[in-house]
Image (cartoon, grey):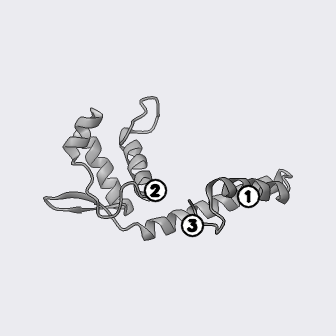
Amino acid sequence: MIILDQTDRRPIYEQIVEKLSDLMLRGILSEHTPLPSVRNLAAELSINPNTVQRAYNELDRLGYTYSVKGKGSFVAELCSVREEQTKLLIKSFSEDVTKLYDAGVSAELLVKEINTIYGNNYSEGGSKQ
């Protein structure tokens, strides 16, 4: 489920947060699914349970999960998280398009590139396959 990169300079808990949040946003971990227990995940990854607990606390803080006392952590309903992520990605996209414009890249080239991406990953109706 999670593979940690020992060469990554980021702390292990941040890698766990990134991997789990990605699995949640992609629907691999669906809403209200329980996450592995802190001890089980720590044993699976051969890391300290405190590191997993820190990652789970961060996922709670970010709205990806919720905790039930005595039961563990569960995947939250991610509508608001997806909306916020979409806003951030659109903002980043706009900044990148501005940089490309300033560098003299034509709109035609950008449209061609977008159509290539959408053509390869999306159906005729514009929805993701």
* CB-based contact (under 8 Å), mark 3 and mark 1: no
Q: Position of residue 37 (x, y in %)?
A: 21, 48
Where residue 39 sits in the image (x, y, percent)?
19, 42
- Left or right of 72 on screen, residue 51: right
Where residue 93 appears, as percent x and y from the top left, is 66, 59
Residue, x 37% and y 41% (percent of image)?
Answer: 2
Quarter of the rendering occupied by the C terminus: bottom right
**Residue situated in front as seen by the camera: 79 or 113:** 113
For marks 2 and 1, give the CA distance.
22 Å
According to the image, label 3 marks what residue?
87
Q: Disc 1 designates what residue?
A: 115
- How many residues crowd mark 1 within 10 Å: few (<14), some (14–19), many (20+)? few
Left or right, 107 with reference to 51: right
Residue 26 circle label: 2
Q: Earlier in the sequence, mark 2 or mark 1?
A: 2
Sort mark 2 into few (<14), some (14-19) or many (20+) by Cα contacts within 10 Å: few
For marks 3 and 1, the one nearer the N-term is 3
Label 1 SS: helix
Q: Gap between marks 3 and 1, in whole Å?
A: 21 Å
Identify the amino acid type marked 2: Arg
**Residue kind at label 3, given as amino acid type:** Lys
**Earlier-in-chain disc, 3 versus 2:** 2
**Residue 61 appears in which quarter of the rendering?**
bottom left
In the image, what residue type sits under mark 1? Asn
